[in-house]
Image (cartoon, rainbow, N blue to C red):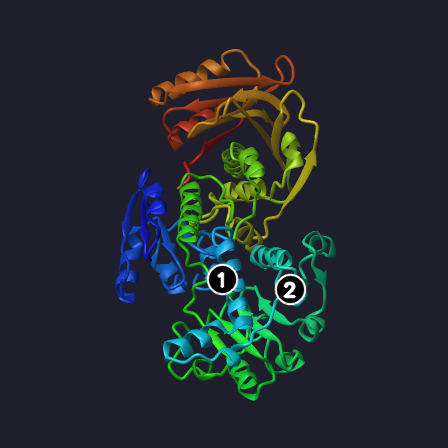
Amino acid sequence: MRILVAEKLALEGVDLLRAEHEVDVRTGMTREEFLAALPDYDALLVRSGVQADAPAIAAGRRLIVIGRAGVGVDNIDIAAATAAGITVVNAPTGNTVAAAEHTLALLFALARRIPAANASMQAGRWDRATFVGRELIDKTLGVVGLGKIGMAVADRARALGMHVVGHDPYVTEEAATLHGIVRLSLGELLSSADAITVHVPRTRDTTNLISSAELARMKPDAFVINVARGGVIDEAALAAALAAGTIAGAAVDVFSAEPPAPDNPLRSAPNIILTPHLGASTEEAQTRVALEAAEQVRDVLAGRPARYAVNAPLLTPETADALAPYLPLARTLGQFYAQFAPDLSGLTLEIAGELASYDTAPLIAATLGGILETHTEERVNVVNAPSLAKARGITLVERKTPQAGRYSSRLTLEGARSISGTVASGESRLVALDGFDIDLAPSEHMLVSRHYDRPGTIGRVGQTLGEADVNISAMHLARSDRRSEAFMILALDEPVPDTTAERLRSFEAMVDVWLISLEAQA
């Protein structure tokens, strides 16, 4: 497949992708050049500068995955990507250490007034008395946002002898306590901390999270640091607070518009340290995020679940490994059922055996994807299948049981009819049809017949297919009793012509015939 790397990426990540795919590194393209190039690619890798917005996603008609070499996905239209069935992955752990260390570097620089002291020395002065600093030990650090980076900052601050308080409505008291963090409301944190650092994404709820009212609650000798996302702290309000001296200082690495405009009020604010979005800019972090993003792009292109998919179920490595062989089976069951059953109401996916102990949301999505592929021309995959199914009034209920009979795990899709399957030696197998036991590997072309068990019926089917030059590669028969109703399922090398199917349906012993087409995943 073809992959477009639209921004500078560490060579290790590019080499990993080039081992399996064709990779074009095209940095510095104009917007027009970027949009014109997108239709030729199956995957896109960006950092924070290139906008993978709705027009870009519409242009990328072949796109299967968009990788962001970094944490934030502000520059990617997640809703548009999800609707288009494009998996979006990021690299949330690769720059954790770099961002945490940069946060503490800025805190030290504020406390010891290092940039101002350096500028004074460079100007030829020796102003020791002017630059008396403050120690961090026994001070209180307030961490707003207790994700990976926020926790990493907290751990390092405690190692420096600081007390750490935190605010995050989505983190439990227990999780905070494990890191030695006292959970507070945002207001309590603002009024009690000697330094405040924010580590939250920029969303509708967090834009200007800290503005004039919040800054007014801070101690007059407190610092505030933003190494997260521009716009989380109101830039105009921060500049005004610094100018008024209501807080002691600030350090800002990220801006609402990058690079910040010449008239951005922070450029002229006193007691501030500005850095040009350096939070993830270490050699080690650049390599880690490139590899983390590239590995996931490779996995998605290979049909495997991504560990850090932004718009698909987040899986642990153990869960991903356990589910991987069953995702193609789930999709096959969905495709088969949609062509076999009279309607798609009241559907249940039973997940039996060892699989029942895992987070099986991807199996539900894969099954829905298989069902929908026969009912829509839109590309359907694990990303957009639930929303497309909901729009069509299709619901699929999950049922789990530890009992899988003689199988380690088994999937059963049932409603008006039922189809079951398992995975044996890495291969999908169909093992039951409407309660009849079968054992057959799914094939691209299949024929299912329900007929009365009469002598010569099987021979007539085989002869009729032979006359149509359709070769049978495998066959399984199942019946409830002698000369009662029976199922026959055939794996075929070629599709069955409609006229041949009508001949088969006209046989006296025949109850019904279904032609099943199992399309390979695009």
Please state the horizontal and vertical placement of residue 162, each as a whole percent of the image. Answer: 65, 62
Q: Could you say whether the residue bearing mark 2 is in a helix, strand or loop?
A: loop
Instruction: In this rendered view, identify the residue nearer to me: 378 or 462.
Output: 378
Q: Residue at x 43, y 66 (%)?
A: 277
Placement of the N terminus among the 4 image quadrants: top left
Q: What is the quadrant of residue 167 in the picture? A: bottom right
Q: Residue at x 46, y 69 (%)?
A: 254
Crowd band around label 1 with a 10 angstrom C-alpha radius: few (<14), some (14–19), many (20+) = many
Residue position marked by numbered label 2 in the rendering: 137
Instruction: In this rendered view, identify the residue nearer to me: 160 or 282.
Output: 160
Q: Residue type at mark 2: give it.
A: Ile
Give the answer, above or below, for where 171 lies relative to 13. Answer: below
Residue lying at the far bottom of the rendered structure = 244
Q: Residue at x 65, y 15 (%)?
A: 481
Left-right relation of 338 to 193: left
- Name the front one of labels 1 and 2: 2
Residue position marked by numbered label 1 in the rendering: 102
Please state the horizontal and vertical placement of residue 467, each as a whole percent of the image. Answer: 35, 20
Placement of the C terminus among the 4 image quadrants: top left
Give the answer, above or below, for where 166 lies relative to 492. Answer: below
Q: What is the quadrant of residue 205 in the picture? A: bottom right
**Sequence-wise, which precedes: disc 1 or disc 2?**
1
Give the answer, above or below, for where 385 lies relative to 485. Answer: below
Instruction: In this rendered view, identify the residue nearer to me: 348 or 21.
Output: 21
Please state the horizontal and vertical placement of residue 294, each as a whole percent of the image. Answer: 40, 46
Please state the horizontal and vertical placement of residue 226, each as a whole percent of the image. Answer: 53, 69
Q: Could you say whether the residue bearing mark 1 is in a helix, strand or loop?
A: helix
